Amino acid sequence: MTVVLHDAQTIRLIGACPAEDGETLLQQLLANPIAQVDWQGCESAHGAVVQVLLVSGRPLQGPPAGEFLHRFIGPALERRSTQFNLSPSR
Amino acid sequence: MNEFVEQFLLESRELVAQATDDLMALEENPGDRERLDGAFRAFHTLKGAAGIVEFAAMSRTLHAAEDILAKLRASHEPVASMVLDECLTCLDLTSRWLDHMQASGEMPPAADIEADDMITRLVSSMDIGEGEKGVALPANNDWLDRLRGAAGGHFPEAVSAVRYLPDPDAFFQGDDPLLVIASLPQLLTVELALSNRTVSLENMNTFRCDLEILALTKAPAAEIRSALLTVAEKAEIRELTAASVSTVAEDYLTQATSVLKAQVVLLRDSGFEGLLGRLSSAGRTAVNALHYLGSNEAITKVELATSAAQAQRNVEPLIVAIERALESKTKADSQPIISPAPIVAPRALRIDMNRIDALVKLAGELIIVKNAIGHAAKRMQGNEDLATVKSILRDQHALFDRLASELQGAVLRIRVLPLRTVFRRFPRLVREIAGSVNKTVRLITEGEDTEADATIVDALFEPLLHVLRNAVDHGIEASERRISIGKPSMGTLILRGRRVAENVRIEIEDDGGGIDVDRVRAVASARGVASEEALAAMADGEIIDLIFAAGFSTAETVTDLSGRGVGMDSVRTAVERLGGSVTLQSEPGKGTVVSLILPFSLMMTRVMTVEVVGQVFGLPLDSVVETTIVNRDMIVAIGSGRAFILRDRTIPLLDLAETLGLARVPQRELPAKIVVVTAAGQIGGIEVDRLGERLDVMLKPMEGLLGSMRGVAGTTLLGDGRVLVVLDVQEMFR
């Protein structure tokens, strides 16, 4: 179990998140519309998981543990979520 | 314009011409590998040149074309004509950009948009050319901009950009597209987007990959290509050029610095072989890079070090100098770079070394003559026998005369270009023009080696294009019509250049329907070009000449080619401005020949001097047919003018004094001295007081306030210091 609902406010990503976690994360996000995602414990995330994060535009609590996520994916998601917040209609 | 840009323009034009030649040859013979290689090399060098002057739009456009040519080289199939067309269009666009830079010294403002458009066309031409194998990537050219925006100018060192659109089934197949990106060498930044904008949490399928991944890396495109080999058809890789990602100034420095660093590596790494050549090329390259940085002090040092290194046959001095330059440059990095102010300079001309050598030799001989004259002057002071000195002076004058005319000839030859430089652009244009009006026309060029003054050759493009357009649009009949009258369905145009005495004659011949004199007459009357009576009195030749009258256009349908309100009059104006003339012969049903007769050189003219009321004037010898003396009783008044009869022909006569508004007492008793001239195909006589000599002169055109003065072709200085006004005969008889 690498996607955990910590409380109604936070969904945690832990360790290495495989493709299947995308679906789990999606369900959690849908069930908890105001929850943020905490990925400080996330070592790596499959593209499917990152895609869910990208679509959600939810704020992320980081930095993530994994180097690639930290250096490249985090900033990219951050730029996206800013855009989402600026233009919520999209 | 700085010297780099000047050099760039010069070289780029040559490369464009070379690439065009190769592509045209490929079109004829799509399997010609040598031409394909040639075209590829030309595009490659052209792209490099654009990179050096930081013309990013040009660089990336050419890069796209180069990519296509590289693919064509790799495949062993004949080249599709669609692809060639786009590559040629790309060269046309490049030419237009070069023209703009030439004229304004700046890069064309719309270049970026035009480049995007061109790249899309190039890419899609390849898709079509490749048939079903077409790249799966949706055409989308804004990704570089988005990536640029994401990078925010933080990564000036970026070398390649990647756009990766994974297969929608990638997740299903157990692939992780992010792992592919993570494996890229020297990754700088990643940008994520959704290829399907309508995806939301509510409707998304987590097993369908809708990611669009963009990345910037420091690794060269080739390296990225091999890293992405497994997903090659889903990825687009671009080598970045100056200013496409970072700000101009940053890249400016990075590029020049890397050039300098490369020279040091080159010098260090190689053995003793070819040392001198390597030293000089490294030195030259370094100087070029430093020029670019505007570092004059370093340039001198590197130049000195190059000679020192060559003298010592040792690379060290040059390495040290380049490294110093690098150090001082890095310190100066923070200072803003002032780009050189654009100045529109006259076009440079490439000249055969032999022609320069001939000039040097002549200069040497002239100095010998100068010394001999000085010597004669001294002897004269020394009270030497006048007769001896006279004969020495006469000999030296003869020698001087010969050398001066040789020098003049040599200088003029420098300004000479073969007509090929303008002719070569037409075969393709003619084909395009013909295609747009659904006709098939071939263009045969003859006498491309005929030479003419560079200014004339340059100025010929527009008028020739206009005549060719007219020939295709109005001259050559539609294929069905041609077949029905027993002509080959393909029309033939001949573009012919040849030297005729002091002139260059260019003929444009078509095998079309010829000119319908009655229709020209009708149209001229309808448009009020001339009155009914005048038209009725005109011979067919004169009627045909009306085509050159301002505002005349007989096209029934206004195509987008010709018939845009600019008629053949613009051709005549352009050619006359160059000191030439245009004539037209037409045979109904057989075709039309338009002849452009141009002076060989704009600079040198042969004139004949004449005197009237004590003043000397020049008449261009080109237009003089003969001189004659006619008894007064042979001159008759016709209407308000006068005419005389020469060999049973009535020729209108002008009195030069009267025409120029000079007062003089009519000389009734003496026979009239008459210069017979041709003007616009007609013969006329000019009465003068005295006939003078024949001179070769460098005609200076009228400038400034006098520039608009009519009837004067230009001026020159006579041996005694007087100004000789050379008259424009064409204008006088108008």
Image (cartoon, rainbow, N blue to C red):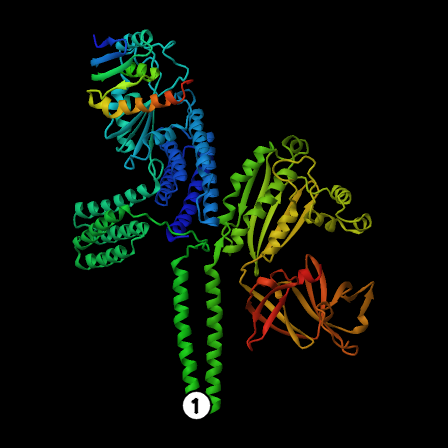
Residue beneath the point at 20% across and 47% down: B264
Q: What is the crowding at mark 1: few (fewer than 14 residues within 10 Å), some, or many (at least 20)?
A: few
Please tell me which residue lies in front, B217 or A45. Answer: A45
Quadrant of the drawing holding the C terminus of chain A: top left
Please tell me which residue lies in front, B707 or B328. Answer: B328
SS of the residue at dot 1?
helix
Q: What residue type is disc 1 on?
A: Gln
Q: Is residue B247 left or right of residue A70?
A: right
Residue B636 versus residue B76 in the image, above or below: below
Q: Is residue B102 left or right of residue A6?
A: right
* Residue B323, percent from left and from top: 20, 50
Residue B17 versus residue B84 in the image, above or below: below
Please tell me which residue lies in front, B577 or B151. Answer: B151
Which image quarter: residue B526? top right
Please tell me which residue lies in front, B553 or A34. Answer: A34
Circle 1 residue:
B381
Q: Chain of mark 1?
A: B
Which image quarter: residue A6? top left
Residue beneath the point at 47% across and 49% down: B104
Q: Is residue B407 left or right of residue B616?
A: left
- Residue B35 visible to the viewer: no
Residue A16 versus residue B11 in the image, above or below: above
* Residue B498, percent from left and from top: 55, 53
